[in-house]
Image (spheres, grey):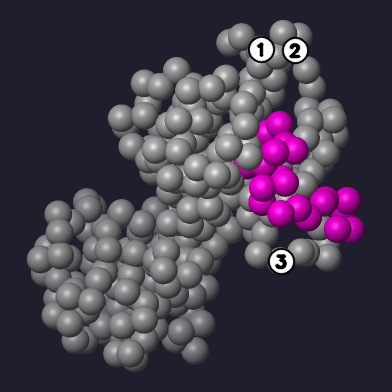
Amino acid sequence: MFRKLVAIEPVSLIPSAEKALHSYAEKVVMFPDVPAGDDEIVARIGDADAVLLSYTSQINRSVLEKCPNIRYIGMCCSLYSPESANVDIRYANERGITVTGIRDYGDEGVVEYVVSELVRCLHGFGQESWEEMPREITGLKVGVIGLGKSGGMIADALKFFGADIAYFARSEKEDAAAKGYRFLPLGELLSQSEVVFCCLNKNTVLLHEAEFEQLGNKKILFNTGLSPAWDEPAFVKWLKGDNLCFCDTLGALGGAHLLSHPHVRCMQVSTGRTRQAFDRLSEKVLANIEAYNR
């Protein structure tokens, strides 16, 4: 059991999960707002031996050096790699601090967003149709960059509607081949696809000027990651053509300065933040704490 557990910011746990935290710590402190900076984070952590945070704050080396009692950090958000994490995991591990995170809790909402926006665009619901005549997803040439959990779910959903699926990933996947998905080099995938979905880890950039030239004109690009999958100058140059880009959040787009672009469609909402996602998040956060305390 922890002596003191502190959530330094809102961590989106459902009420029953917040209540359950008290069974893992003698004292639990939940802060209702996001700390202004490192000094406030250090003050909130104090002498706590366990810390929870979401994706809106960072626990860097400087914070860890000033909080010597920490032995557990629970990220109540996605953790894919040390490079993309908002905790200095490598330094934490050097200090003997366990850092846990979660995955695959908001993907269902993202898939629904993708299907909804693509159908509206192709059919012209509430807007001009993408082509002169409304069309179905049937036969649409779709390229998925990053066939992880969310990329795989998007591919499966569009396959159900009859899309022709190709993908690019670090390696070819047997289960994807069994579904009839074609593994292609990135350049070939970009040139052949009518619609491209970037489903990459945070801070992963694969689309540069050469890739946008391969993508070409009259294309639709979705970015479902937490950060842009492109170099911004090359992206903006590509947007000047007869192209469209869809993102759900400003983080995925790259900033508010791009919102007014006529070829950008940004919801400014995290489409993975649903009631069911919070249920899944809460279950996984508690499971990580339970596993650590065994």
- Structural crowding at the residue carrying mark 2, measured as other residues with C-alpha within 10 Å and reported as few (<14), some (14–19) or many (≥20): some
- N-terminal of the pair, mark 1 or mark 2, is 1
- N-terminal of the pair, mark 2 or mark 3, is 2
Gap in Å between the C-alphas at discs 3 and 1?
36 Å
- SS assignment at label 3: loop
* Span shown in magenta: 177-197
Amino acid type, mark 2: Pro
- N-terminal of the pair, mark 3 or mark 1, is 1
Q: Does residue 196 show up magenta in the picture?
A: yes
Instruction: Residue at 71%, 31% (x, y): give it.
Output: 194
Gap in Å between the C-alphas at discs 2 and 3?
36 Å
Which numbered tag is attached to residue 129? 1
- Structural crowding at the residue carrying mark 3, measured as other residues with C-alpha within 10 Å and reported as few (<14), some (14–19) or many (≥20): few
- SS assignment at label 1: loop
- CB atoms of marks 1 and 2 within 8 Å: yes
Amino acid type, mark 1: Ser
